[in-house]
Image (cartoon, rainbow, N blue to C red):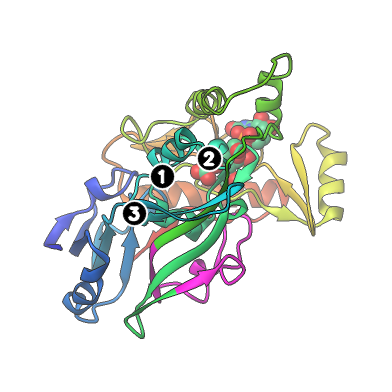
Amino acid sequence: MKIYHDISLRPYHSFGIDAVADRVIEVSENDELQQAVKAAGGEEPLVVLGRGCNMLFSDVFHGVVLVMRTRGVCVIADDGDTVLVEAMAGEDWDGFVRYCSNKGWHGLENLVAIPGTVGAAPVQNVGAYGSEAADVIHSVNVFDLETMTMRSLTASDCCFAYRDSVFKHALRGRCVVTSVVFRLSHSFSPNLSYKAVGELFANEGPIGPSQLMAAIGDLRWSKLPHPEVLGNAGSFFKNPIVSRECGAALRTAYPQVPLYPTADGCKVAAGWLIEQCGWRGRRVGQCGVYERQALVLVNYGGASFDDIRQLADAITADVQSRFGIILEREAQYNIT
Ligand code: EPU
């Protein structure tokens, strides 16, 4: 375990903001968690980070940041058809996805190249290209900060939904994800449900997992900025889910609006709404809206938390006034 005081969070999150935290505690073994919580001394808030790919901090953050650096992957059951694979929270997500696929454990391929760690995946139920983590999560092991003990949650306990889970609600700030167990398949059946992926392979013969991962990686990086090059948190906003009536009214007014039916309404592409408001590619001081994907806010270097917040608020206000739709952030603010 390593403890740092009054330290810049720049290397700990993907937005590249020079926020300073009271304390950062890096944990490399689950056994250190009790000690880490004691070292935090009840100081609040306590924020758990993997790579901080979805997080923003106020420029001065009076709180404790607990960074999970635990590593390891193991098979805990194998019935010949499916395999239960447990990965420690600090494992790199992309590396884990590729490792599993190369081992012949399939089901994660569409989630390749997403920045972040395994421990963060269930919290926001990471998703992309027609797949989400919840599709293959069997259970999530956590360290309960109240009882200071380990416990296991089933996938159903996790209440997974679009970019959402119990970890953002009832269990927010109350536990640390220590490992995730995935149910993967020994047979590979490509998920080509995302339109652009289906189109890429429309005239191909059988597709292998490496081919699919390569195509998805290329697609991803053709639209999204690499955090090492340009600070960002991926999609800054969620795609809003509106009622069927609202979706129908939007379609009438804007026949080209991208809409996706859901169980209880329809999802609207927030990137499209933001682009219609003229924000795509717009720069405001040291931050702006990415030119190739309006859902992504970027830090050109030197942006402060308030710069980003003001930009996000201006976008939200414009979308609301033009379309009557309130955007919800996917990026999480940690403010003290
Ligand atoms: N669109 C625009 N303008 C834009 C961006 C998008 O008109 O600036 C339109 C596109 O043309 C398309 C539709 O909006 O018709 C959807 O765009 P895209 O396929 O790029 O996906 P998205 O809904 O904008 C979501 C996820 C991404 C994920 C992609 C691919 C959310 C909040 N975002 O974006 O996730 O990579 O689908 O599956 O659900 C992330 O969470 O960080 C992330 C990058």
Q: Are marks 2 and 3 in contact (CB under 8 Å)?
A: no
- Taking the image as shown, residue 120 lies to the left or right of residue 326, namely left
Residue at the farthest top position: 203
Residue 244 placement (x, y as % from top left) = 84, 54
Image vertical order of residue 195 relative to residue 91, above or below: above
Tell me whether the residue at label 2 lies in contact with that at label 1, contact meaning CB atoms closer than 8 angstroms: yes
Picture quarter with the N terminus: bottom left
User: Chief secondary structure of the magenta span?
Assistant: loop
Q: Relative to residue 123, is residue 107 depicted above or below?
A: above
Ligand 1 quarter of the rendering: top right
The residues tagged by marks 2 and 3 sit, at their Cα atoms, a distance apart of: 17 Å
Q: Is mark 3 on a helix, strand or loop?
A: loop
Q: What stretch is highlighted in magenta?
A: 152-178
Observer-nearest of 133 and 170? 133
Local secondary structure at mark 1: helix
Label 1 belongs to which residue?
A: 93
Question: Mark 1 to mark 3: distance in Å?
Answer: 10 Å
141 vs 84, nearest the viewer: 84
Query: Could you tell me residue 187's position as x and y percent?
Result: 62, 38
Estimate the spatial distance between the alpha carbons at disc 2 and disc 1, rounded to whole Å: 9 Å
Kindly identify the amino acid type of the residue bearing the numbered disc 3.
Gly
Quarter of the image where one finds residue 193: top right
* Magenta highlight on residue 167: yes
The answer to whether residue 191 shows anywhere in this view is yes
Residue 45 % position (x, y): 31, 73
Amino acid type assigned to the residue bearing label 2 in the image: Leu
Q: Which of 80 and 304 is in front in this view?
A: 80
Q: Which mark is residue 111?
A: 2
Residue for badge 3: 50
